[in-house]
Amino acid sequence: MAKYLIINADDFGLTEAVNRGIVEAYIRGCVSSTSMMVNMPGLEDALKHARSLPALGIGLHFNLTYGFPLADPKSVSSLIRDDGSFRIIGTAALDEERHIEAELQAQWQCFIRTGMYPTHLDAHHLLHQHYPAVYRVMSRFAAREGVPMRTVQRTDLRTNLDALDVRPLMTDRIILDTYHALGSLARILHYLQALDEGTTELTCHPGYSDHTLQALSDWTKMRELELAVLCRPEIRKTIYEQGIQLITYRSLRRCRQPLASPARQGVF
């Protein structure tokens, strides 16, 4: 069985500087896919890049923690503060499924109105891994829309899909602990050399830092370190030597070989 790898850069659309880094990591490096935030200041710039890069896979990076909602505030009242902005992560209830679904639908429709169709669905700050209600809403939505969804490392959440009777398409496994690891060339080479057969997603956050990003996020200079590593020639060389095929979520259904049960899906 072949080794298929999606290297997905999160936060496309966050700022112009982040967009520039993601595009560079795609053109010069090994990024094959990205996830776009549709309610952030870098959206229009991201769309300009996207239209010139048709082979780049672009999914929806569902956002419930930065900026303002796109849905009617009355329909997402549990998710927002008095000024109408999203509650910061850790303070939002994130258990009112109808509010979560209302905002997901609004962000999805915003993406569709760009003239593109999302290749997949994932969540900013990995909210679907930490909040079961977000996971349930996203799983049902992805299955209904027929798009792949980012998997999680929590086997209890994946197993609970049996009770929901929904089967969104996911990769066999995911490499998530990359926030600090991708600043190290040795670490990412280890991931590639140890990659299992089947389908894997590796998440990353390349980008450039600027004042706009610094006002939004604490994750600034590390994005530049990730970008530098992802563009190192050793990465491409190792991908080739290990027989790894870089893909996007567009190809996942063709490449995915179902495993016997969710509990057997390995994770890093």
Image: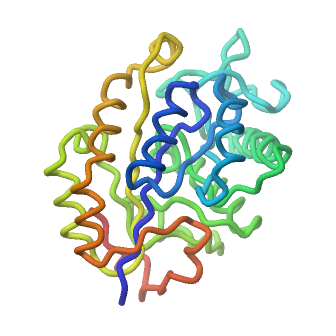
Quadrant for residue 66, please give it: top right
Residue 46 in percent (x, y) is at 65, 36
Instruction: Give the position of the C terminus as an image quadrant.
Output: bottom left
- The location of residue 155, given as percent across then percent down, is 39, 65
Number of callouts: 0
Q: Position of residue 240 (x, y in %)?
A: 29, 72
Is 155 positioned to the left or the right of 53 in the image?
Answer: left
Query: At x 65% / y 72%, what residue is drawn?
Result: 166
Color scheme of the displayed model: rainbow
* Residue at 19%, 58% in the rendered image: 189
* 41 relative to 255, above or below: above
Q: Measured from the top left, where is residue 238 in percent x and y?
A: 23, 65
Q: Does 198 appear above or below 33?
A: below
Q: Is residue 154 left or right of residue 168?
A: left
In screen coordinates, is 76 left or right of 236?
Answer: right
The image quadrant of residue 47 is top right
Q: Which residue is rendered at x = 47% and y = 46% of the image?
A: 9
